[in-house]
Image (cartoon, grey):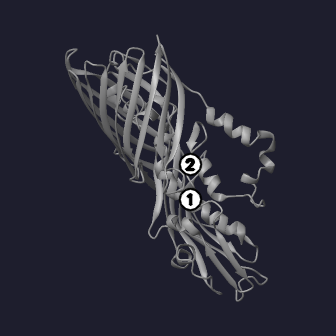
Amino acid sequence: MRHRFSGLILVLAFAVGAPAHAQFLTTDARQVGMGGLTLHRGGDLIRYNPAYRSVPGREGGAKAKLTIPIPLGLIQFFHDHPISQLGDDPMFNPDSAGFDPFAIANFVLHPPLFLEIKRPHTPANDVEFTIGKNELIIDLGRAQLLVPSDEFGFGGQSRMLDPGFGFKGFRVSLMGWMAQEVGLTLGDTLRRLLKEGQPATPNTRYNLLADATGQFGFAPSLSFSGKVIGDTVQALYFGAAVRRYLGTAYGHVNGDAGFITSDTLFASPGPVEDVNARVSYSRVGNSSGTGVGVDVGFVFVSGPVEFGLGVNDIGATLTWPDTRVDTVYWDAAGDSIVSALVVNHVETQTELALSYIANVALVLGTGTTVGGNILYNGRRTEIHVGGEQRLGPLALRGGVSRDGRKRMQFGFGGGLYFGAISLDVGFATHSTFLSDERGITMATSVSIY
């Protein structure tokens, strides 16, 4: 039973933590130090607003040509967990008394690229099991707060690389993309078992409902960005990109999985696995899913003030012409999961979630730049407000944000410029660990301008 409940805890941990972690997957210590805000006309601004490709960088605040992280966290991690001993490391071995599913979830949700200055207390191994021949009570302790009462999940789209070439504002590129949408709901009996600590009962089904979609592929793109009207003091910039989405593979699962206890909880045979789902998919090598999506963006600059708005994947609906639909169930006789064809070679449509960014910035003659943005991507909305003060070769930074879990976070840091190179450090709080407490991360990087 240990492995089964460890797996359930991992599922809960990933789904609860995933919406909050994306904002700190940046390698730029400047952005970390401003609470996740981009003020240098790069990063999230270019990702979500195609007009920013044509907006020139500010004097003294140009976007970096290259940012190189200094992975102090990885050095510390591999000192504590040597690569040669990972196979026997208690942290990753379910058979070890030191195995902790919360630690695994934290490791994935918050990769140790940077140093953890303050590591918050997590639920960890305060889980208690009361076990008898016909008795099972699971006390998750503080982790009960993580057990949701309603549907929970995560989603969004990642754009991986976008190599291309351009001329006079036009650009041709090939973008890799991946999208996922996951919704999970605990069955009533499982929720009461985990959240309320009710004893397990014989002849009872404990299950988890799932509705998940994943798809990935490539997208040849044609984009344009340029100044619509104005001069060096006041100008309006426009950008747009038309993407021909070519889906490489797609999968959708709708159903539930769990187990049914026997007449006596820990008698032989033990609980019976129970899986009942419908799966539709198009494998790699099948006909591609195809569709067209449009990105549009505007940037208005008037002296020291700047406004921007970008919207992605307008009308992005993909048609998969060769989809197979299977029913999946647990074969008790064969003690395995089996599938049976329902229908083959059918057409299926999927949508890519709309995303947007709205931002504002104010640049003062004293070397002060302040701003904020609202970023929506899939299921989560993040808000960032921050600023930077330049004092000769020194830059001081700070910011606040509201993360995907609707919690306030704080950042501060600085940078030292040596000509076209800056050495930057940023500190930021986070709640990506599975705890009500905040942790503090220290990021370090080198930027080349």
Mark 2 Cα-neighbour bin, 10 Å: few <14, some 14–19, many ≥20 = many
**Position above or below: 88 against 335:** above
**Residue at left offset 57%, top offset 55%:** 121
3D distance between C-alphas at marks 2 and 1 = 9 Å
**Position above or below: 306 against 245:** above
Q: Which residue is mark 1?
A: 13
Q: Amino acid at mark 1?
A: Ala
Between 430 and 59, the one lying in front of the other is: 430
**Residue at left offset 58%, top offset 41%:** 116
Q: Earlier in the sequence, mark 2 or mark 1?
A: 1
Rendered location of residue 101, percent (x, y): 65, 58
* Tag 2–tag 1 contact (CB < 8 Å): yes
Residue 87 appears anywhere in the view: yes
Rendered location of residue 45, percent (x, y): 37, 32
Q: Amino acid at mark 2?
A: Leu
The N terminus, quarter of image: bottom right
Between 190 and 255, the one lying in front of the other is: 190
Outermost residue to the top: 419
Rendered location of residue 415, percent (x, y): 46, 23
For mark 2, give the secondary structure.
helix
Residue 308, located in which quarter of the rendered image?
top left
Left or right of 358 on screen, residue 199: right
Q: Which residue is mark 2?
A: 109
